[in-house]
Image (cartoon, rainbow, N blue to C red):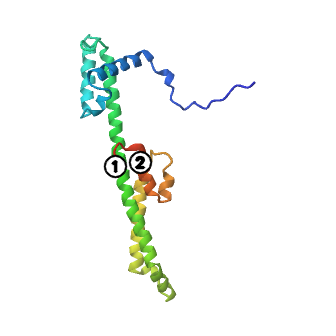
Amino acid sequence: MTEGLKHDAEKPRWELLPLATVEDIVKVLTYGAQKYAPNNWQLVTPKERYLAAALRHITAWQSGEPVDAESGLPHLAHALCSIMFLHYLDTEEKQNNSCTIIRALCAKAIKARDVCKNRKRANTPELLRMQRNGKSVFETELWHEIRLAYIAHDNIRQQLKSACRDMPGVSNLIDTEDYETLRDYATKHFCSVEKP
């Protein structure tokens, strides 16, 4: 029998977590849930208050006080917990900011796409008539307006691609101009706000 294969070389190695330290963090979380409410920390603003809390616990530990007098738990576990909160809230804030930008760009892209389609549809008969009469449509003001609409649309598409560079599997939505699905995907996976 040959040895089995498992392709997990690039996956996070959870077994490297020091479980005793994790348990102390969980004890701090449990203490906080009993003192305030479960997950109350997610409602605290501004997030920088957790930086101050972490520094207070680190300073106490540095001053020779290993255990927090109120909770009876290690100051460093409290500090780690505060830094974890800070990391979570900072990540959420960045995702929500990115989501707001993506939603706004999707709205602009939908409008620009529809302008291009409507202008092309409305003006194609006129452009064809000009061509039949031997006129160069590329020099007309009408063609220039259509071209500007397409340039504006393309600029918004490039902005969307840049804003979505960290979102796997969405480039095809931009390429196919399916901005509604992209907006809904961003809302569902990256925003804490409700869909409009």
Residue 186 location, x and y as percent? 41, 48
- Name the amino acid, label 1: Thr
Q: Quadrant of residue 22?
A: top left
Give left or right: position of 4 versus 93.
right
Q: How many marks?
A: 2
Residue 171 location, x and y as percent? 49, 52
* N-terminal label among 1 and 2: 1
Residue 138 location, x and y as percent? 45, 78
Q: Is residue 140 above or below residue 67?
A: below
Mark 2 closeness class: few <14, some 14–19, many ≥20 residues within 10 Å: many
1 and 2 marks in contact (CB < 8 Å): no
Residue 37 location, x and y as percent? 29, 26
Helix or strand or loop: what does disc 2 sit on? helix
The residue where tag 2 is placed is 186
Give left or right: position of 192 versus 53.
right
* Numbered badge on residue 190: none
The residue where tag 1 is placed is 100
Mark 1 closeness class: few <14, some 14–19, many ≥20 residues within 10 Å: some
Residue at x-position 25% and y-position 32%: 44
- Name the amino acid, label 2: Ala
Residue at x-position 49% and y-position 55%: 173
Helix or strand or loop: what does disc 1 sit on? helix
